[in-house]
Image (spheres, grey):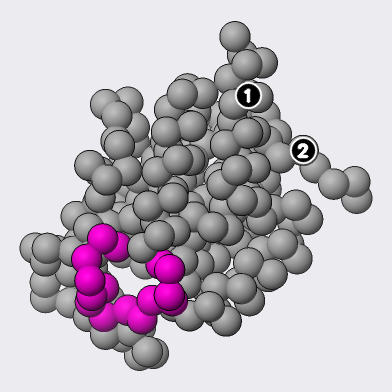
Amino acid sequence: MPRQPTLVGNPVLLVIDIQKSAFMDHKAGIPCMPGYRDNMERARRVVDAAHDAAIPVVFIQEIHRRDRIDYGRELDGTEDIHCMEGEPGTPVAFDEMGRQPGDYYVPKRRYSAFFGTELEILLKGLKAQTLILVGGMTDVCVHYTFVDGHQHDYYCRVVGDCVGGTSIAAHEASLNAMEYLQEGAVLSADQIVAALAEARAAAA
């Protein structure tokens, strides 16, 4: 198959689990690779570029009830209690990410932003064709959302220096796995910002 363009049809930016904890010294319950916070801060460039290009932005939030009823099997592995409602690190980092009034918000109880949420209905309403992913964790929520987007036949693009994993090895392995599914899927912030600027110019 020929390599696809960076942006096909209508793009939508998914800001996955960039929550207050990303900007705290300790991210409760989940290990983080070195440079995680730097990558989350860099993601703001992509959000701003999407806003400038009038590209829809969807903020995704992992959030769990305090009685732990909706964690499922999430605590069977390395992760401890995380993203619990009422905790200081759980709210979406709207201020840090420059949320605007027209942006969308989708909460989730599982890793994939598609699983048990309204995301697919929202994307159909937006007539989305390309999904741009930033946020965390590269090897968990970003990866699983990418795979579900791929299986729903979206063109998926992940901004490699605007996502962060549980370790550098896991981060790099997941980026390689996503690139395996869609050639050209892994881009830098500079590349995706340039592509969004081109889309803005084309629409003018």
Q: Amino acid under label 1?
A: Ala
Which quarter shows the C terminus?
A: top right
Q: Residue at x 63, y 76 (%)?
A: 173
Mark 1, Cα crowd under 10 Å, few <14 / some 14-19 / many 20+, is some
Q: Quadrant of residue 66?
A: bottom left
Residue 57 place in picture, x, y as percent: 42, 36
Residue 143 among magenta residues: no
Identify the mark at residue 5; answer none if there is no mark.
2
Residue furthest right in the image: 1
Which SS type dominates the magenta stretch? Answer: loop
Q: Which residue carries the number 1 mark?
A: 199
| Nearest to N terminus: mark 2 or mark 1 | 2
Foreground residue among 83 and 24 = 24
Q: Quadrant of residue 79?
A: bottom left
The residue that appears at 40% across and 60% down in the rendered structure is: 38
Please tell me in which quadrant of the rendered image residue 154 appears: top right
Left or right: 110 in relation to 154: left
The residues colored magenta run 22-36
Secondary structure at numbered mark 2: loop
**Picture coordinates of residue 171, whole percent (x, y):** 55, 73
From the top left corner, tell me how far across and down residue 15 is, in percent: 41, 48
Q: Could you say which is closer to the camera, residue 37 or residue 80?
A: 37
- The percent position of residue 33, horizontal first and vertical second, equals 44, 76
